[in-house]
Image: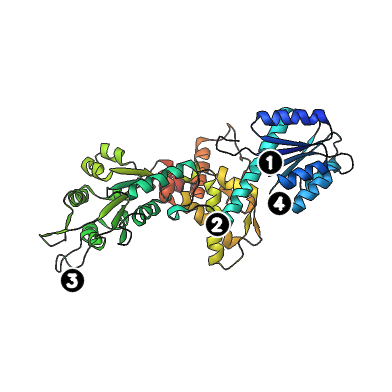
Amino acid sequence: MTSGDKRESILVVDDVPNTVEVLQRNLALQGYTVFTAPGVAEALRIIETTPIDLVITDLKMPKISGIDLVRHIRENLADMEVIMITGYPSIEGAVEAVKIGAEEYLPKPFTDEELLSAVRRVLKKLRFRRLGETAMMGTSAVPYGLIGESQPMQKVFDAIRKAATTTATVLISGESGTGKELVARAIHYSSPRASASFVPVNCGGIPETLLESELFGHTKGAFTGAMESRAGFFQTADGGSILLDEISETSLTMQVKLLRVLQDKEVFMVGSGRGRRVDVRVLAATNKNLSGAVKSGLFRQDLFFRLNVLSIELPPLRERGNDIILLTHHFVKKYAGELARPAPTFSNDALLALRDSYAWPGNVRELENVVHRLLVMAEGSEIDVPDLPAVMRFSIPRGSGLHRTLAEVEAEHLHNVLASVQGNRTQAAKILGIDRKTLREKMKKIE
C-alpha cells in the first residue's frame, strides 16, 4: 500500500490456529486490517457484516470447503478478491480454484515474501478494477472538464482556482497534448469574466505576415485585399479572456507589439494611428521552455516577465499514473456514443499496458486517438493487449546484443520513435532532438 491508500481489509480463513496466527501477524505488520475465521460458516458471518477486500482461504476444511467459499464469493460478492492456500497442492486443485474465481493459488509451505507478493498483486488488481468501474459510472470528479485524480493534477486544479480569482496574466506550460487550452478555459469560465468571450488564438498556426492583423484588426485599405475594416481577436475578447497559444512561435517584432498591449491596455489596428482601449485578460501557453528561449535571445525577457505573473505547468501523461485509466474509460464512453455501439471493456492487462508500458509522447491527445482507433477497429466486447498498438506490447528484441552495427541500432530506434507518434515526423524529430531535415535524410538511408 502507498501512504495515500486506505487500510485494506483481509479475512483469513483456516482451521489451523498456528497458520492463522502467522498470517495475521505478517499481514498486520504490513498495515492491513486483518480478520480471522476458523471455518467457512464463521467467514460468511464476517463477510455479511464487514467490508472485506481480500479473502485468503484454505482449500480443505471441515464441513464446508474453501472451494465452496470461493464459489459463494464469486456468485454473490463481485467486489472482493480471493487467494487460495493449501497443504495438498495439485495441478487439478489449482486449475479448479482459478477456474471458479480464485485470483492466486499458493501451495504450503510458502515464504512470507511469496504471500505478501501475492497479496499485493491481488489488491493492486482490485484497486485497478474499482478505479475503472468508478470512471465508467461517471462518478469520478471532473473539475473544469479536466479528468484526473493524481497528485500532479490536484496541484493544477488548485492553481486554476487561485488564478480564477485574479486578473493577472497566466503562463501555462506543458508538452503538446497535455491540455493547456482546457486549463485556460477553466480559468476563464471559473472567473468573473465567464459570461464574456473566451478567444483562443494559435499563434503558431497564423502566418507572421497576417498575425498582427488577426490579433489587432485592420482598417479598410490598410493593405492589399483589405476591402473593409475588421476587428481583431483582442477586440473580440474585450471584457473576456484571450489565449495566446504557442506564444513562443511569435517573432521578436510581434513580441514588442504584444508587450505594448499588456502595458498600455490598448491595441492599434493595422492602418490606424489611434489606439483603442481593451479590457482583456491575457492567458498564454507554450510547449517550450520560455526561460531558455530568453537566454537564447529568441524571446524577449520583458514580455516573459509580463506573461509569467502566474504560472501553471501541466504534467506529462506518463507522470499521472492511474489518470491514464480514468481518461481511457472517459474516451471509451465518448467514442462508443459517437459510433453508436456498446462500450467495450478493457482487460486489466490492457489497462496495465496503457499505464505502464508506454511513455505517451503525445500525451492525452495521443491517448484519445489510440482509444478512438481501438473502438473503430475492435470487433469483440473486450479489448486486450494483442489489440493495442505494437509499441505498447512486450516483444523479444530481435537481433539484440552486442553484434549489431550502430546503423542497425539507429535504424531500429528511428522506426520505434516514428511508430510511437503514428508517423508524425515533426513530433519524432522533437523526441530525437534533431530537426526534420536531418530525420528525413536518415530515413532515406534506411528506407
Question: N-terminal of the two: label 3 or label 4?
Answer: 4
Q: Do the residues labelled 4 and 2 touch (CB within 8 Å)?
A: no
In the shown orientation, is residue 129 left or right of residue 257? right
Relative to 132, say whether 295 is above or below.
Answer: above
Q: What kind of residue is marked 3?
A: Glu
Residue under pointer 2:
138
Position of the N terminus by quadrant: top right
Residue 185 spot, x, y in % from top left: 37, 55
Q: Are marks 1 and 3 in contact (CB under 8 Å)?
A: no
Question: N-terminal of the two: label 1 or label 4?
Answer: 4
Q: What kind of residue is marked 2?
A: Gly
Q: What kind of residue is marked 4?
A: Ala
Residue under pointer 3:
228
Q: Distance between the residues labelled 1 and 2?
A: 25 Å
Residue 246 spot, x, y in % from top left: 32, 51
Question: N-terminal of the two: label 3 or label 2?
Answer: 2
Residue at the (45%, 44%) spot, across then down: 154
Residue under pointer 1:
122
Identify the element where label 1 is drawn. Answer: helix
Q: How far apart are marks 1 and 4 (CA)?
A: 14 Å
Residue at the (19%, 49%) spot, across then down: 253
